[in-house]
Amino acid sequence: MTTAFEKWLESSKNYQSPNGVEKPQPSELLKYLPGLYARDEFMGRFLKIFEDTLKPLQQMTDNLAYYFHPLMTSPEMMEWLANWVNLALDENWSLEQRRKLVLSASDLYSRRGTKRGLAEYLTLYTGIEPDIAEYMDGMSLGPETLLGINTTIAGRERYGFTVTLRMNGISPEEMAQKEIIIRRIIEAEKPAHTIYRLRILTGQQSQKA
């Protein structure tokens, strides 16, 4: 059912005063008041003051969900969101990388300390899927097994793994900076009792740790 305010608002849209000046539109806040005030021109103009003041706040409220979305919010708000999920963002990461990290934080936490979790974290930063090789436990030699023929004594640590990344087209300076951040990620995400080896392959150059 059309209210008295809506009827009056519709009839006043195309109204022009005799001198050709358009009549100002009444405040939309009138629709929240009793119908008695719908035809009160002064009230319509008076409420415009509050409407102009409250409209930005209303627009912010209507779009509140966007303020809490890491891919859409402002950089300042994103830093605040990172604190919510207990993330200390590295200033060396690009804005896009930090946004994706905050967005993926809950999933990364659920897989922390796992091979999959580490791979996802490194992929977020580098854009390259790493190769993570875990060292398997050794074996006992049987009575017919000859050491040195089909088996060897390796010096690999029992709780170790190797991370290999292939990154091309990067300057030595940029590579050095990326390696620092990559090591920070591995140290933070790996199980505490494990040790690792990092290999960064850049074309024909291989960096080993």
Image (cartoon, helix red, strand yellow):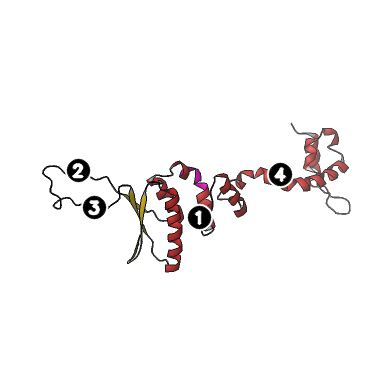
**Mark 3 against mark 1, which lies toward the viewer?**
3
Residue 96 visible in the displayed image? yes
Q: Which residue is mark 3?
A: 154
Please tell me which of labels 2 and 3 falls first in the chain: 2
Q: Secondary structure at mark 4?
A: helix
Please tell me which of labels 2 and 4 falls first in the chain: 4
* Amino acid at the residue labelled 3: Ala
Q: Is 165 on the left or on the right of 58, as rendered?
A: left
Q: Position of residue 185 (x, y in %)?
A: 45, 53
* Amino acid at the residue labelled 2: Ser
Residue at left offset 69%, top offset 46% = 59
Residue at left offset 38%, top offset 64% = 168
Q: Main secondary structure of the magenta part?
A: helix
Residue at left offset 27%, top offset 45% = 137
**Mark 4 against mark 1, which lies toward the viewer?**
1
Q: Nearer the viewer, residue 178 or 45?
A: 178
C-alpha span from label 2 to label 1: 46 Å
C-alpha span from label 3 to label 4: 68 Å
Please tell me which of labels 4 and 1 falls first in the chain: 4
Q: Secondary structure at mark 1?
A: helix
- To which quarter of the image does residue 1 belong? top right
C-alpha span from label 2 to label 3: 13 Å
Q: Which residue is mark 1?
A: 97
C-alpha span from label 4 to label 1: 31 Å
- To which quarter of the image does residue 144 belong? top left
**Mark 2 against mark 1, which lies toward the viewer?**
2
Q: Are marks 3 and 4 in contact (CB under 8 Å)?
A: no
Please tell me which of labels 3 and 4 falls first in the chain: 4
